[in-house]
Image: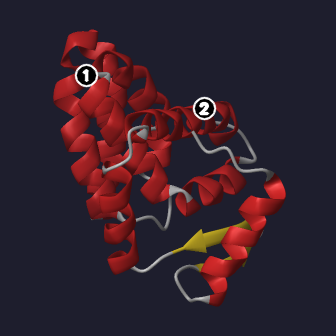
Amino acid sequence: MCELNEDRALDLSEALVRHSLVQLDHTEFGPRMRMLETIRAFVAERLATRSDAAELQRRHAEFYEALVEDADRPLRSVGWSEWAERLQVEERNLAAAARWYLDHHPATLPPYAASGDAALGVPGGHPHRSQRLVQQLLPSAAFAGPPGQGRAAVGLGHDCERS
């Protein structure tokens, strides 16, 4: 597991920025790091060789599942736009988390997909990317019956309207 203290993690993060391996963006939700696709591919290859890769991916998916659950109620209320923007910033992480559940725990996916339907179709997001993801989720929602399929289809419907 990642056994870094906060100071060491900050030092390493700053070194990545200095060497242009990641770019630091300042957003209203705090600093965000992003990387070039070539760097992302390299990191994914390295992660795959780690003995704790599965655990790190599980923790990543659980973190974003909790974020979507936290967003569920606010997305259905007056202050929805702030949460929609926050989830838009996390679009790639949300998609990766949903794919992890799809691959590893499809039985827990329908509640995740249902609460994430708004997250997968956030305004200003990438409609084709989220549409493909929801299309992948629908067959997994089949065992949840009509409610699970219907709630997952909501995300697909929103994306079809925007396409």
The amino acid on which the numbered mark 1 sits, given as a three-letter code, is: Ala
Please say if the residues under marks 1 and 2 sit with CB atoms less than 8 Å apart. no
**At which x and y percent is residue 98?**
37, 39
Residue 90: quarter of image: bottom right
Residue to which mark 2 is pinned: 66
Residue at 39%, 76% in the rendered image: 39
- Furthest residue to the left? 139
The amino acid on which the numbered mark 2 sits, given as a three-letter code, is: Ala
Q: Is residue 154 at all visible to an observer of this figure?
A: no
Of the image marks 1 and 2, the number of the one nearer the N terminus: 2
Q: Residues within 10 Å of mark 2 (few under 14, many from 20)?
A: few
Residue at 67%, 80% in the rendered image: 15
Residue to which mark 1 is pinned: 141
**At which x and y percent is residue 38?**
33, 79
**At which x and y percent is residue 126?**
37, 66
Residue 97: quarter of image: top left
Helix, strand or loop at mark 1: helix
- Furthest residue to the right? 7
Distance between the alpha carbons at the discs numbered 1 and 2: 19 Å
Residue at 67%, 48% in the rendered image: 80
- Up-down relation of residue 148 to residue 32 (above or below): above
